[in-house]
Amino acid sequence: MMDKYTDKYILGIESSCDDTGIGLIRNNQIIANKVLKQEHKQGVIPEYAARAHHQALYEHAYEIIKEYPIDLIAYTKGPGLIGSLFVGASFAKSLAYGLNVPSVGVHHLAGHILLPYWLYHVNLPYLCLLVSGGHTMIVLVEYTKNIDQKFRYKVLSTTLDDAVGEVLDKIARKLGLDYPGGPHIEKLAALYSGTGDANFVPPNINFQKFKFPYTMRNRVDFSFSGLKTAAIEQIDIDASLEEKIEFCYFLQKHIAFLLAQKMREIASKLKIENGYDIKHWAVSGGVAANKTICHALEDAAGENDAEVFYPPMELCTDNGVMIACVAQLTACVEDMQLDKMLTARPDAQLML
Ligand code: KG4
Ligand code: ZN
């Protein structure tokens, strides 16, 4: 995979939400990947997040900049928290100005979606399940010959209400777990079988113990608000640890089933209606770090003779490498996409 910027040092700055990502890539290799996690036990506080990005960027980007001759700086232009985006964009553009190199704004979701392609040479077109704190969608990624756009994204399914990561975070809060809740739910679920493996199904378990809705069956979109309400109704902070472990196990299995089932439905719809038989699937976004979900997707893909690709855990959640890789893959289609002007304005075009 050789693009105009492949052999250049590309710095990627991610600051859309609460994690500050600083990544450096060159020649399809990751040279640096720093992710500074912020502490938001009760959920992200935007003002605090913006200030913490500012501090993290000033404290940690320098170590990379002083060591490598940066050729291009990519930053997240949206979607995200406006204060956090402003800090990252202003930092990236000022640095680019100071180093006399170009900068380019990158769509955050394109980062998650294209990362598996960049890492594993996934075949185009591929189906990407993007599952994060803010989004839940299935996207068909295709090649396009447009001069200003190399990839075309078709959103085939999206959530009508909450994103799956957000649901995990809200339920985790009800359980008294810290933010972000997804990893805590996964840890508790893994304790259920006593094997530490959340995919293990113990014999004689009562699948009816908790009742979770199966909404949007045979419809293109997802809906998670009913599941969130039902889940929150069935548990609270005073439940015993055993009860919480069991609840997390079933909840996680149910969510994994819903996501895998929608991938099955969309893949079969594509095949029947459009004649597309997609053999490569990708999963990305923070929730893709969840092993039970990936396991369910592997089963669904296997039934379709397809293969699933997902980034290593540290690249599933927000990071600067994914922003740099979009710049390598797309910004360079035409240099007109590079913004050399010092206008620290996170781009208002937030549509994918
Ligand atoms: O992609 P991401 O880092 O940020 C957004 O763009 O939203 O995703 C964050 C989300 C949070 O909701 C978090 O609870 C969830 O990803 N998450 C997980 C896991 N690790 C992070 N959910 C389930 N299992 C995990 N291991
Ligand atoms: Zn994200």
Image: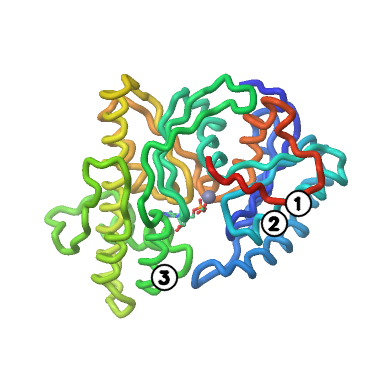
Q: Quadrant of the N terminus?
A: top right
User: Quick one: label 3 or label 1, which is nearer the N terminus?
Assistant: 3
Check whether the beta carbons of the residues at disc 2 and disc 1 lie within 8 A of each other: yes
Residue that badge 1 annotates: 344
Outermost residue, bottom direction? Answer: 238
- The three-letter code of the residue at mark 2 reads Phe
Residue that badge 2 annotates: 86
Check whether the beta carbons of the residues at disc 2 and disc 3 lie within 8 A of each other: no
Residue 125 is drawn in which quadrant? top left
Residue that badge 3 annotates: 177
Q: Residues within 10 Å of mark 1 (few under 14, many from 20)?
A: some
Q: Secondary structure at mark 3?
A: loop
According to the image, what is the colour scheme of the structure?
rainbow
**Mark 2 C-beta closer than 8 Å to ligand 1:** no
User: Quick one: label 2 or label 1, which is nearer the N terminus?
Assistant: 2
At x 41%, y 32%, the residue is 127
Circle on res. 233: none
251 displayed left or right of 179: left
User: Quick one: label 2 or label 3, which is nearer the N terminus?
Assistant: 2
At x 30%, y 75%, the residue is 236
1 displayed left or right of 178: right
Separation of disc 3 and disc 1 at Cα?
A: 37 Å
Residue 248 image point, x, y percent? 30, 62
Q: Secondary structure at mark 1?
A: loop
- The three-letter code of the residue at mark 1 reads Ala
Residue 165 image point, x, y percent? 42, 56
Separation of disc 2 and disc 3 at Cα?
A: 30 Å
- The three-letter code of the residue at mark 3 reads Leu
Question: In the displayed structure, would residue 187 be above or below residue 78?
Answer: below
Question: In the displayed structure, would residue 302 be above or below residue 73?
Answer: above
